[in-house]
């Protein structure tokens, strides 16, 4: 087919498919325009088809090669794109062709698990773009990412700064720059960038959060608290924010406010582990606040002023401090009530329950004495030897009142294992002698009565009679 026949066929096709077409009209500009339009719409596969049509009309058309290469990149076809972009580079060693090939290298490189030669090739081409077209905006941005991935952090920061110099309002990339500066130890510069972000977008949550962390690291608690106040006002459901502010407040000694913030954080978080940890920390802050008050009467007022939920949630843990404060202010009846409540939730210490057991022992209520003594023994530690001795003594004496002699014998023997004694030690052995007598253990009864007589207490005459009675009844010498 000669040139004339070719134009005739093309004209006929135009008439059939387009309706109008003048013989000899060049279709390439229309095809390029169509391809660019499709590419702008994200219809990359169709754009490739349009570029192919243009290239059939005019092979090695530079603009079509560039467009097709970039469309293939968008389709994830890095190797195909590289082949097309290499053709463009061979045609013209200009910024667009190097950019096209750099995009291809990057796309191929993303499939690698580590930094590869593809990334290095992309860096070389983007450097060429930056050299040939200093006004190109994509080059420094791509270079910053590639440099950072390669570990060339200072070069990455310089490239990103260069990009941002031409874009005074890009908040997201300024946040990235601030992060990179922070990671490379350039804290003051990072702060300056955060300040710039907050000037562009006042109340930017992440910028406020990072600036707070910076102020905290520098010990500038006042500035940190100001930022946290604004942050939590804008994001009232920010659990980590409340937790961090709680820590900050605690570090400055404001345990009351710290407890409230950490408690709030625990109520907001969806994490079970965080909730558990933060509740425990909140309890510690609450106790720190209460114990910081030296006046026991005021401390009782502080405890009484807690809201119902706090009393319910932390009440068991506050039993000990409430008990101590009430005892010191002479409110023993109220202190006993606290210990009585502690029987249910099981919090407190051995001394609390010893106090309660001793107090109710004088009221003639042996069963309550036993209950308090048992709980006290459960909570006693290795350092509570005296408390263990006295709790066992009170429990044994209470069992004696109930004529439960085996249980009394066990408790009183445990009390005897410790030196010293609540009241008279001679009385302890007198009770042990009687318990064993009632259990028909004559030899043991005689042993304990003899020990009571040796100590010589106020019941010496009675003990002498008891010894004679045991010897006669059990025929002992």
Image: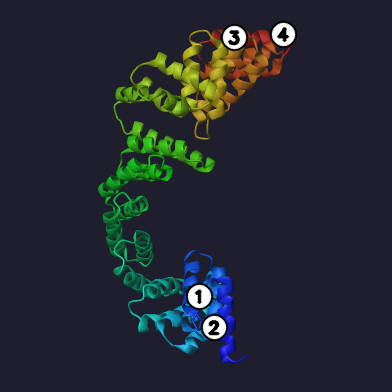
Mark 2 Cα shell of 10 Å, populated few (<14), some (14-19), many (≥20)? some
The answer for how far apart the CA atoms under marks 4 and 2 are is 131 Å
Mark 4 or mark 3, whichever is nearer to me: 3
Q: For the residue labelled by badge 2, is the local secondary structure a helix, a strand or a loop?
A: helix
> For mark 3, what is the residue?
401
Residue at the bottom extreme of this rendering? 2
At horizontal 27% and vertical 51% (from top left) the residue drawn is 220
The answer for how far apart the CA atoms under marks 2 and 1 are is 10 Å
Could you say which is closer to the camera, residue 415 or residue 170?
A: 170
Report if the CB atoms under discs 2 and 1 are less than 8 Å apart.
yes
At horizontal 31% and vertical 41% (from top left) the residue drawn is 253
Which mark is on residue 318? none
Q: For the residue labelled by badge 3, is the local secondary structure a helix, a strand or a loop?
A: helix
Mark 3 Cα shell of 10 Å, populated few (<14), some (14-19), many (≥20)? some
Residue at the right extreme of this rendering? 475
The answer for how far apart the CA atoms under marks 4 and 3 are is 24 Å
Please say whether residue 226 is visible from this viewpoint: yes
Against 184, residue 233 (above or below) is: above
Residue 383 % position (x, y):
50, 34
Mark 4 or mark 2, whichever is nearer to me: 2
> For mark 1, what is the residue?
31
Question: Mark 2 or mark 1: which comes first in sequence?
Answer: 1
Question: Mark 1 or mark 4: which comes first in sequence?
Answer: 1
Question: Mark 4 or mark 3: which comes first in sequence?
Answer: 3
Q: To which quarter of the image does residue 461 belong?
A: top right
The answer for how far apart the CA atoms under marks 2 and 3 are is 115 Å
The answer for how far apart the CA atoms under marks 1 and 4 are is 127 Å
Mark 1 or mark 3, whichever is nearer to me: 1
The answer for how far apart the CA atoms under marks 1 and 3 are is 109 Å
Question: Mark 4 or mark 2: which comes first in sequence?
Answer: 2
> For mark 4, what is the residue?
473
């Amino acid at each position: 087919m000669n040139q004339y026949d070719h134009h005739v066929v093309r004209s006929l096709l135009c008439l059939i498919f387009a309706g109008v077409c003048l013989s000899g009209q060049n279709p390439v500009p229309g095809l390029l325009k169509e391809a660019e339009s499709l590419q702008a719409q994200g219809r990359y596969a169709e754009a490739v088809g349009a570029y192919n049509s243009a290239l059939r009309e005019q092979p090695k058309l530079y603009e079509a090669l560039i467009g097709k290469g970039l469309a293939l990149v968008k389709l994830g076809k890095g190797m195909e794109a590289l082949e097309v972009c290499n053709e463009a580079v061979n045609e013209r060693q200009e910024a667009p062709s190097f950019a096209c090939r750099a995009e291809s290298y990057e796309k191929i490189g993303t499939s690698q698990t580590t930094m590869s030669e593809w990334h290095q090739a992309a860096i070389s081409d983007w450097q060429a773009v930056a050299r040939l077209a200093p006004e190109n905006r994509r080059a420094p941005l791509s270079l910053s990412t590639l440099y950072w991935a390669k570990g060339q952090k200072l070069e990455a920061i310089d490239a990103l700064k260069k990009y941002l110099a031409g874009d005074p309002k890009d908040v997201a990339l300024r946040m990235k720059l601030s992060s990179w500066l922070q990671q490379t130890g350039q804290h003051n510069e990072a702060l300056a960038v955060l300040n710039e972000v907050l000037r562009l977008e006042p109340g930017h949550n992440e910028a406020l959060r990072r600036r707070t962390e910076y102020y905290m690291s520098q010990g500038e608690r006042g500035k940190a608290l100001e930022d946290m106040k604004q942050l939590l006002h804008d994001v009232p459901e920010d659990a980590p924010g409340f937790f961090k502010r709680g820590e900050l407040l605690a570090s400055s000694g404001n345990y009351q406010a710290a407890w409230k913030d950490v408690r709030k954080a625990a109520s907001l978080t969806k994490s079970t582990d965080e909730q558990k940890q933060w509740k425990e920390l909140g309890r510690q802050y609450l106790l720190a606040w209460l114990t910081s008050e030296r006046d026991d009467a005021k401390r009782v007022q502080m405890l009484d002023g807690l809201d119902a939920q706090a009393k319910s949630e932390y009440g068991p843990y506050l039993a000990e401090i409430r008990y101590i404060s009430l005892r010191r202010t002479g409110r023993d009846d109220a202190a006993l009530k606290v210990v009585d409540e502690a029987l249910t939730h099981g919090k407190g210490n051995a001394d609390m329950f010893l106090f309660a057991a001793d107090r109710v022992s004088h009221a003639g209520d042996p069963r309550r004495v036993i209950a308090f003594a048992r709980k006290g023994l459960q909570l006693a530690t290795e350092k509570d030897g005296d408390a263990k001795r006295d709790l066992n003594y009170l429990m044994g004496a209470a069992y004696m009142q109930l004529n439960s002699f085996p249980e009394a014998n066990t408790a009183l023997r445990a009390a005897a294992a410790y030196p010293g004694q609540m009241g008279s030690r001679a009385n302890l052995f007198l009770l042990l002698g009687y318990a064993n007598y009632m259990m028909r253990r004559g030899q043991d009864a005689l042993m304990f009565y003899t020990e009571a007589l040796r100590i010589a207490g106020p019941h010496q005459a009675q003990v002498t009679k008891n010894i004679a009675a045991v010897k006669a009844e059990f025929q002992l010498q």
